[in-house]
Image (cartoon, helix red, strand yellow):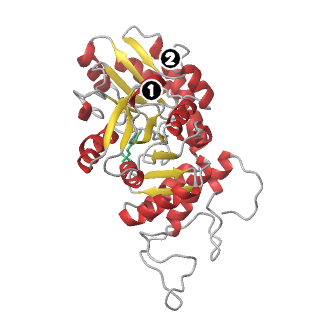
Amino acid sequence: MTEHQLPQGFETLAIHAGQEADPQTGAVVTPIYQVSTYKQDGVGGLRGGYEYSRSANPTRTALEECLAALEGGSRGLAFASGLAAEDTLLRTVLKPGDHIVIPNDAYGGTFRLFAKVLTRWGVEFSVANMQDLADVRAQLRPATRAVWVETPSNPLLGIADLTGLAEIAHGAGAILVVDNTFASPYLQQPIALGADVVVHSTTKYMGGHSDVVGGALVAAEAGLGEELAYHQNAMGAVSGPFDAWLVMRGIKTLGVRMDRHSSNAEKIVELLSGHAKVTQVLYPGLPEHPGHDIAAKQMKAFGGMVSFRVAGGEQAAVEVCNRARLFTLGESLGGVESLIEHPGRMTHASVAGSALEVPADLVRVSVGIESVDDLLADLQQALG
Ligand SMILES: *Cc1c(COP(=O)(O)O)cnc(C)c1O
């Protein structure tokens, strides 16, 4: 890490953590070390500790140190995708016969990983409403090793009390895993609230430009960090150097982007809340949102994700998505450009018929950082 240990704020860390100027050339930005292997000075004589790029690569190391600094953890690790990070985490902390509590509104791909992959491997899971701590407690078993939560959740923007969940998990001898993809570490710091591991799809706000797929883990404690690093190398689902570089570049502007995503979202919410065709707006910044007080306590702002229900049911919701022009119809989220989608038929089609099914009249928007008046005009015309 850095030599000069002045106290550093989030935006400073986002730009500098793990990223000293290149010692050989003075390059201000960490280069893309597009390399697989490293010359040794005599057998075992590694220069700077690098041996083979699955085990470690200087570009990835820079990103990993930055991730750890931003989440306030002891170890950051970068992966090829969010799901690759999740798989590595789960097969590090769980073994056949173990049990995990997962949210009833988990990201669809995360639910599929549990339901279709981990169950075949002998791991059992229970689904809980993470907004109801009594329900989470009721799902615990002697074999429970982890509690998994996303807050805000996808696509219903539910808010879970991280401090409360950490207490429950730790009381049961389990770890608390927080998927912090929707908030990003700029808006929410789960480790400070008791989380043991933070998960990211860096594809979303961390990368921030819809040009890379990546994932990350940050461990609070060095011991678990070591185990995860061992499995990262043993399982091999690492981030490539160019992808790591893109994520690192995106992170430099995370703070200013999140501020604008949040303020644009607030204006969109205002429009939707007063619109005759909208029957409900789901946004934690709304005082009537059931998780508003907790969100106000554990988040710096309420983020750029907004969901709403459209009068007229599924067909009306699909038509709103189809009519949008500046809001691009597409999956994913967290980029500078605004996106719109119909979760029931798109991102959450894989959970249809399960406890995680979402309302058919639901539309989800990822509010970008374009001129907000243009975004408002587009939603206005899409609502008809
Ligand atoms: C996208 C996403 C994931 C999965 O990440 P990938 O990078 O697509 O593998 C996990 N959790 C959340 C909340 C996501 O939005």
Amino acid under label 1?
Answer: Leu
x 58%, y 57%: residue = 222
**Is residue 105 in view from this perspective?**
no
Rendered location of residue 379, percent (x, y)? 40, 22
Which mark, residue 119?
none
Q: Quadrant of residue 138?
A: top left
Residue 347 in the figure: left or right of residue 136: left
The answer to whether residue 287 is above or below residue 108 is: above
Q: Of 116 and 124, which appears nearest the observer? A: 124
Left or right of residue 62, residue 151 in this image = left
For label 1, the SS is loop
Residue 205 locus on image (x, y percent): 49, 42
Work out whether 122 lies above or below 45: above
Between 83 and 8, the residue placed more toward the observer is: 83
Q: Which residue is mark 2?
A: 289
Which residue bears the numbered disc 1?
157
* Other residues around mark 2 within 10 Å, as few (<14) / some (14–19) / many (≥20): some
Identify the residue at image location x=43%, y=31%.
153
Q: Secondary structure at mark 2?
A: loop
- Sequence-wise, the earlier of marks 2 and 1 is 1
* Front-most of residues 107 and 336: 107
Amino acid type of the residue tagged 2 in the rendering:
His
User: Residue at 49% across / 90% down in the picture?
Assistant: 43
Residue at horizontal 58 percent and vertical 37 percent from the top: 188
Q: Quadrant of the N terminus?
A: bottom right
201, above or below 132, in the image: below
Quarter in which the C terminus is drawn: top left
Task: Give the Cα distance between marks 2 and 1.
Answer: 9 Å
